[in-house]
């Protein structure tokens, strides 16, 4: 741990002085209280809009970031005692229809003509909210964290309307003050607006953002100046009850169908305008879309993101500690194999500098598995330092209740009595976002048989207009355990340097191109190299928004445990065997403006045991905009190995249909045929948003054996949720 001290000091050198001047402080938009009622209808005929100040003269972000945008966009904002209003005139630069995928909520940014608002109500350049729409009226809303990231799984109450004209499309929205978090009394918010126009392939922003950064980068926001402090949202209590009915049937066991009728309740209580308490009793997440299946040729557990709404608000306070494969807390561990009985989450801002997150969840016992009732508790504190950097502390506790492992028979699974983690983390983000990084240390505690473990890691990244480099290293001890985290492997050192360069030529065809070199090396605690993946890429981004990437890689693996290289046959390579190979590949994505889109990638080269592996992935899409979107994903693997494996081939195929009758009625059906795990999955999901954040869901799921097409399990759920503000 001693070497972390100079690293922390080094990072601190790059933290700008406290409350440094905002880069785009001169970009100021004045907002005044509406002088007349505003109807959200996409028509700018109210007196309040005629009096509102206009944000115009957007700057181009891509393809170049050195001039004003050629596509004209005008933005006006206003407010009343209850809502924040926004109206945007998105003028067309050339004739032709708008381009969108569908009316599906939280659309893919790069595949839709769209307008987005990025809002930083604390003006801390780090946390905020995003709202927007595509040109057909599909809504976009998300919570922002870490200065750039947007969690689109976050969902709240607001209304919007889009109207299309021959020369423009108009987006109008009303966002209740009760739907966002902000500091009472503050009169300046960070704000920026982003416009993507696919006909001209131009992305622009009101306050200029360098092209190497997303338009969502809060370090480059301008300022929304209020004529008076925003209204106090007042008492804000939301009750969200649900009721559901349905059945499930296990075809493999031959048991009769089981029927369920359940009710539950979520509550959201705003303790202040910036601090929220979430409560849940008997939650049910059956409406959450099924995870997409993937071909798994990895030696370690795969990561699937959290989708359950209860865990999402301010989720970065809990889940952003560590790195992608070194997370001390991962909320999907809660309720994974046991029902959640009740829970509470406190999250938000204490003041401009301090944020807090606290979570407590209780799961019930599963008698048939011998799993005891368990309690999960998490506390997170975060303080802003410097311009945009933070220091955070985390405590995670998992406790089995009324449970003594010594009393469990030897033929049954034994669970630990407790597992605890404490951690400290420093996140670097310079004022101009050129320097970012992290340094963290974690300590785990368990029963005597498990003991204590430690993990620490750090990285430092520099991203200019052309040059990008990153250094990262990790250490995880043998006894480090995070039962409520995501740590697929332990007992290693890891170093992972990378460097890349981009040229931006004055070309009518190419937007940018350049190489990147990466190396990921793992070492045992004794210093023996166990893994090495070194690869070089060359990527080309075309002005049409299509892209091409070619790569070459060399892999070395010293197996630390037996491994089946097909994850299919059950036959394994021995511990201690060495394997190395080289491979090449390419990836291509077509331009998103076409109604027919396609992407493909291929790989050819060596594999374990001097074998060969060939892989081909293809994604096809066709849309009847804006109502119907058809997609087909396919993944083919051919693995040629010596005896006893021989030649193995398997497919993963997934057709999908999205029907969006309006921006409040959604119908999705997708099928996944996974030859590797011998499964066919059918998932059909109907959603009617009859009021903002209030829904009716009908979800049907089937799993089959591919041959002779026998049903494994089946379920049908009808669920009703209603967001009620007393």
Image (tube, grey):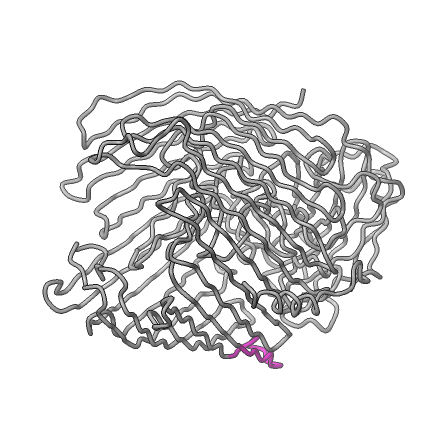
Quarter-of-image position of residue 105: top right
Confirm whether the magenta stretch covers residue 660: no
Quadrant in the picture for the N terminus: bottom right
At a point 66% along the width and 39% down the height, the residue shown is 160
At a point 41% along the width and 51% down the height, the residue shown is 303
Quarter-of-image position of residue 16: bottom right
Can you say whether 393 is above or below 309 in the image? below
Instruction: Say left or right for 632 vs 504.
Output: left
Q: 127 or 191, which lies in front?
A: 127
Confirm whether the magenta stretch covers residue 504: yes
Quadrant in the picture for the C terminus: top right
For the image, the number of numbered tags is 0
Instruction: Say left or right for 581 vs 13.
Output: left
Q: 377 or 1, which lies in front?
A: 1
Q: 310 or 90, which lies in front?
A: 310
Q: Position of residue 56 (x, y in %)?
A: 79, 58
Instruction: Say left or right for 261 vs 145.
Output: left
The residue stretch that appears in magenta: 500-514
Residue lying farthest front? Answer: 448
At a point 39% along the width and 37% down the height, the residue shown is 336
At a point 66% along the width and 67% down the height, the residue shown is 9
């Amino acid at each position: 741990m001693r070497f972390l001290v100079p690293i922390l000091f080094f990072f601190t050198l790059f933290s700008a002085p406290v409350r440094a001047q905002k880069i785009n402080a001169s970009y100021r938009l004045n907002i005044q209280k509406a002088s007349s009622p505003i109807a959200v209808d996409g028509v700018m005929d109210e007196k309040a809009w005629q009096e509102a100040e206009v944000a115009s003269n957007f700057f181009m972000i891509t393809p170049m970031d050195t001039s004003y945008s050629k596509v004209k966009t005008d933005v006006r904002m206003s407010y009343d005692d209850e809502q924040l209003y926004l109206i945007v005139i998105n003028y067309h630069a050339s004739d032709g229809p708008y381009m969108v995928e569908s009316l599906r909520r939280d659309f893919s940014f790069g595949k839709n003509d769209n307008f987005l608002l990025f809002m930083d109500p604390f003006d801390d350049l780090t946390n905020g909210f995003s709202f927007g729409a595509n040109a057909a009226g599909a809504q976009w809303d998300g919570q922002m964290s870490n200065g750039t990231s947007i969690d689109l799984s976050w969902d709240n109450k607001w209304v919007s309307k889009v109207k299309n004209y021959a020369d423009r499309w108009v987006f109008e929205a009303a966002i209740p003050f009760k739907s966002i978090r902000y500091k009472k009394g503050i009169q300046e918010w960070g704000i920026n607006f982003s416009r993507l126009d696919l006909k001209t392939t131009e992305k622009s922003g009101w306050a200029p953002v360098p092209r190497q950064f997303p338009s969502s980068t809060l370090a480059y926001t301008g300022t929304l100046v209020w004529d008076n402090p925003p209204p106090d949202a007042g008492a804000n209590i939301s009750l969200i009850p649900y009721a559901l009915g349905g059945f499930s049937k296990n075809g493999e066991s031959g048991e009769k169908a089981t029927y369920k009728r359940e009710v539950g309740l979520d509550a959201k209580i705003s303790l202040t305008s910036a601090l929220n308490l979430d409560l849940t009793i008997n939650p049910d997440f059956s409406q959450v879309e099924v995870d997409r299946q993937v071909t798994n040729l990895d030696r370690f557990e795969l990561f699937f993101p959290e989708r359950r709404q209860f865990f999402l608000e301010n989720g970065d306070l809990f889940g952003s500690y560590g790195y992608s494969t070194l997370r001390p807390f991962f909320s999907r561990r809660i309720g994974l194999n046991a029902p959640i009985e009740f829970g509470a989450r406190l999250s938000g801002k204490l003041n401009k500098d301090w944020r807090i997150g606290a979570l407590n969840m209780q799961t019930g016992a599963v008698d048939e598995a011998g799993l005891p009732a368990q309690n999960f508790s998490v506390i997170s504190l975060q303080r802003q330092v410097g311009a945009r950097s933070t220091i955070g502390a985390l405590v995670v506790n998992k406790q089995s209740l009324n449970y003594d492992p010594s009393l469990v028979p030897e033929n049954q699974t034994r669970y630990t009595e407790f597992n605890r983690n404490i951690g400290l983390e420093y996140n670097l983000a310079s004022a101009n976002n050129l320097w970012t990084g992290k340094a963290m240390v974690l300590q785990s505690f368990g029963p005597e048989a498990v003991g204590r473990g430690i993990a620490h890691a750090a990285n430092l990244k520099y991203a200019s207009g052309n040059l990008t480099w990153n250094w990262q290293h990790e250490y995880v001890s043998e006894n480090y355990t995070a039962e409520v985290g995501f740590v697929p492997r332990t007992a290693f050192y890891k170093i992972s340097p990378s460097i890349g360069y981009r040229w931006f030529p004055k070309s009518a065809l190419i937007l940018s191109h350049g190489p990147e070199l990466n190396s990921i090396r793992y070492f045992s605690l004794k210093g023996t190299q166990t893994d090495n993946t070194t690869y070089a890429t060359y990527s080309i981004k075309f002005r049409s928004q299509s892209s091409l990437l070619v790569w070459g890689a060399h892999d070395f693996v010293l197996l630390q445990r037996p491994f089946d290289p097909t994850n299919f046959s059950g036959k394994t390579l021995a511990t201690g065997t060495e394997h190395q190979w080289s491979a090449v590949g390419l990836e291509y994505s077509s331009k998103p403006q076409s109604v027919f889109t396609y992407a493909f990638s291929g790989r050819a080269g060596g594999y374990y045991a001097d074998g060969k592996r060939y892989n081909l992935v293809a994604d096809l899409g066709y849309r009847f905009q804006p109502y119907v979107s058809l997609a087909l994903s396919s993944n083919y693997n051919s693995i040629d190995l010596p005896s006893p494996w021989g030649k193995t081939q398997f497919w993963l195929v997934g057709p999908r249909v999205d029907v969006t009758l309006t921006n409040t009625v959604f119908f999705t059906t997708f099928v996944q045929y996974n030859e590797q795990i011998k499964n066919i999955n059918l998932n059909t999901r109907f959603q009617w948003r009859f009021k903002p954040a209030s829904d009716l869901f009908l979800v049907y799921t089937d799993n089959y054996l591919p041959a002779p097409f026998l049903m494994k399990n089946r379920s049908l759920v009808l669920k009703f949720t209603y967001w009620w503000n007393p």
